[in-house]
């Protein structure tokens, strides 16, 4: 009798434990917890889900953590500095707190270790970048504004036009350093694309100046400092407007903050001196062409590759190696071939469709001997046939037997091989850095002339692998290929 009562009591206690556990213990995946905490603005609780030096591998978790740091940075730089939060980050060993001196005092910037691990051009990367920009609550150094601006205009805003437009407008209200002609073109393309997208704050906001020597001011109203003059037909794009209406020189309207691309600055102007214009269709076509090329291209990178297994979508005889992370990206080390018994294998990726450019990003080697780090093959008659071999040493890039001297700086290089017209049994190509041609008329190794005429072939990218790691290596970050 006593024994049965004991068992009943134990059963009741056990049941209570189970009920308590399922009621008060959260069994959800950590990323689900992080998402809910972020949505409820419990940003420190998000960080506390992770060990201080931990970098998760999932894109969702990386995005949430990056956005969390941006929101906390916004809190740090509010009207009154949150001293408890400031002390928290000063004590946090693996989070670097940087102090920027600005016209409005010290700005506290939290260096984000998660953002650099997000896959570039992915949705998580875009969301995290937009959050960073929208969380800026007061001016930061011009160089940092320029950095964010260049990152933003390289991204495709399609699918997130409204949030992208908000971020771009917000960023353009801050002074930034002059950007180059190419980057200015990208910025204008993006602005005009967004100005025809209904629902964005830039919708129908392109205009030109009416009149001569129209005053630009530092704020909405004639009492604010004059910061320049503009005359018709100067183009502009308006970012926001003041609600107060007034009449100036017989014109009714209100004050608008507008971006002036020719001067690369933002200022306030009275709307009575503006004439609305339509978005520039030529710029929109250039925008669509730019991202159409991105849509059609194949991009190969090594994010998510840990070195133990062959990189995704490659095939061949893989030799494991340690991944190396530099510039916030994972690089694939390709070692030099030294010594006896150091045999070479290769891994390859098949490419579909026609291709006429191969863009590759790499960090040069310290080796005096050229290290082959990429091969471009044509696949036909069931075999791979080498067309181009690309190598690098401490001072040069080699394509087949053609050499171009680099400037010696051990930085990341971004070059592209453009496949041009065919001559007999070989292709002609040229090596480019952005819009600058480096080497012209680079002949491929001999191929089948009849196959080239019929077009019955496919392209293949291969990476040569030495069986033993050596001191010298080329670090390959990514390859892009498609049709210009």
Image (cartoon, rainbow, N blue to C red):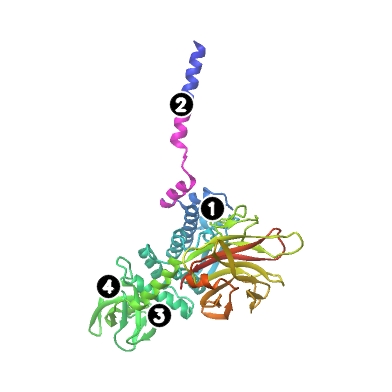
The residue at which mark 4 appears reads as 244
State whether the magenta stretch is mostly helix, strand or loop. Answer: helix
Could you tell which of marks 1 and 2 lies nearer the N-terminus?
Answer: 2
Tag 2 near tag 3, CB within 8 Å: no
Q: CA distance from mark 2 to mark 3?
A: 70 Å
Q: CA distance from mark 1 to mark 3?
A: 40 Å
Q: Nearer the viewer, residue 153 or 426?
A: 426
User: Which class describes the residues within 10 Å of circle 4: few (<14), some (14-19), or many (20+)?
Assistant: few
The residue at which mark 2 appears reads as 15
The residue at which mark 3 appears reads as 261
Residue range corresponding to the magenta coloring:
15-39
Could you tell which of marks 1 and 4 lies nearer the N-terminus?
Answer: 1
Above-or-below relation of 155 to 229 = above
Q: Nearer the viewer, residue 398 or 67?
A: 398
Q: CA distance from mark 4 to mark 2?
A: 66 Å
Residue 187 highlighted magenta (yes or no): no
> Farthest residue toward the right?
340
| Badge 2 element | helix
Could you tell me residue 120's position as x and y percent?
A: 50, 63
| Badge 3 element | loop
Could you tell which of marks 2 and 3 lies nearer the N-terminus?
Answer: 2
| Badge 1 element | loop
Tag 4 near tag 3, CB within 8 Å: no
Could you tell which of marks 1 and 3 lies nearer the N-terminus?
Answer: 1
User: Which class describes the residues within 10 Å of circle 2: few (<14), some (14-19), or many (20+)?
Assistant: few
Could you tell which of marks 4 and 2 lies nearer the N-terminus?
Answer: 2
| Badge 4 element | strand
The residue at which mark 1 appears reads as 57
Could you tell me residue 256's position as x and y percent?
A: 32, 75
> Farthest residue toward the top?
1
């Amino acid at each position: 009798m006593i024994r049965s009562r004991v068992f009943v009591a134990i059963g009741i206690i056990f049941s209570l434990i189970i009920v308590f556990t399922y009621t008060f213990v959260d069994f959800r995946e950590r990323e689900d917890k992080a998402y809910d905490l972020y949505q409820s603005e419990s940003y420190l609780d998000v960080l506390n889900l992770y060990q201080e030096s931990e970098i998760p591998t999932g894109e969702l978790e990386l995005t949430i953590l990056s956005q969390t740091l941006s929101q906390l940075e916004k809190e740090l730089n509010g009207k009154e500095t949150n001293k408890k939060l400031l002390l928290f980050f000063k004590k946090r060993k693996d989070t670097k707190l940087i102090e920027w001196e600005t016209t409005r005092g010290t700005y506290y910037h939290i260096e984000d270790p998660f953002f650099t691990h997000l896959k570039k051009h992915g949705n998580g990367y875009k969301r995290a970048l937009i959050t960073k920009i929208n969380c800026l609550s007061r001016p930061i150094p011009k160089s940092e504004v320029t950095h964010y601006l260049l990152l933003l205009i390289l991204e495709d805003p399609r699918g997130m036009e409204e949030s992208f437009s908000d971020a771009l407008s917000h960023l353009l209200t801050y002074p930034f350093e002059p950007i180059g002609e190419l980057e200015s073109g990208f910025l204008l393309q993006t602005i005009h694309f967004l100005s025809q997208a209904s629902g964005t704050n830039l919708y129908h906001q392109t205009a030109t100046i009416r009149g001569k020597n129209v005053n630009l001011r530092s704020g909405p109203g004639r009492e604010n400092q004059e910061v320049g003059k503009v005359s018709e037909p100067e183009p502009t794009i308006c970012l926001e407007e003041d609600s107060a209406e007034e009449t100036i020189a017989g014109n009714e309207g209100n004050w608008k903050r507008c971006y002036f691309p020719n001067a690369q600055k933002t200022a306030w102007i009275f709307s009575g001196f503006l004439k609305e214009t339509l978005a520039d269709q030529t710029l929109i076509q250039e925008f669509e062409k730019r991202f159409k090329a991105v849509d059609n291209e194949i991009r190969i990178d090594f994010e998510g590759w840990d070195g133990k297994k062959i990189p995704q979508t490659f095939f061949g005889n893989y030799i494991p190696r340690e991944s190396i992370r530099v510039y916030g990206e994972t690089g694939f080390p390709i070692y030099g071939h030294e010594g006896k018994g150091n045999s070479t294998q290769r891994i390859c990726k098949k490419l579909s469709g026609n291709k006429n450019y191969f863009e590759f990003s790499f960090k040069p080697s310290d080796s005096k001997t050229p290290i082959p780090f990429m091969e471009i093959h044509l696949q036909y008659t069931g075999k791979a046939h080498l067309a181009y071999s690309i190598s690098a040493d401490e001072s040069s890039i080699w394509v087949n037997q053609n050499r171009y001297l680099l400037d010696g700086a051990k930085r990341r290089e971004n070059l592209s091989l453009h496949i041009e017209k065919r001559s007999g049994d070989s292709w002609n190509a040229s090596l480019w850095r952005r819009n600058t041609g480096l080497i012209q008329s680079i002949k491929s190794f001999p191929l089948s002339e009849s196959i080239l005429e019929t077009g019955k072939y496919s392209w293949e990218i291969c990476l040569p692998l030495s069986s033993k790691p050596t001191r010298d290596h080329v670090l390959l970050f990514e390859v892009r290929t498609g049709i210009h």
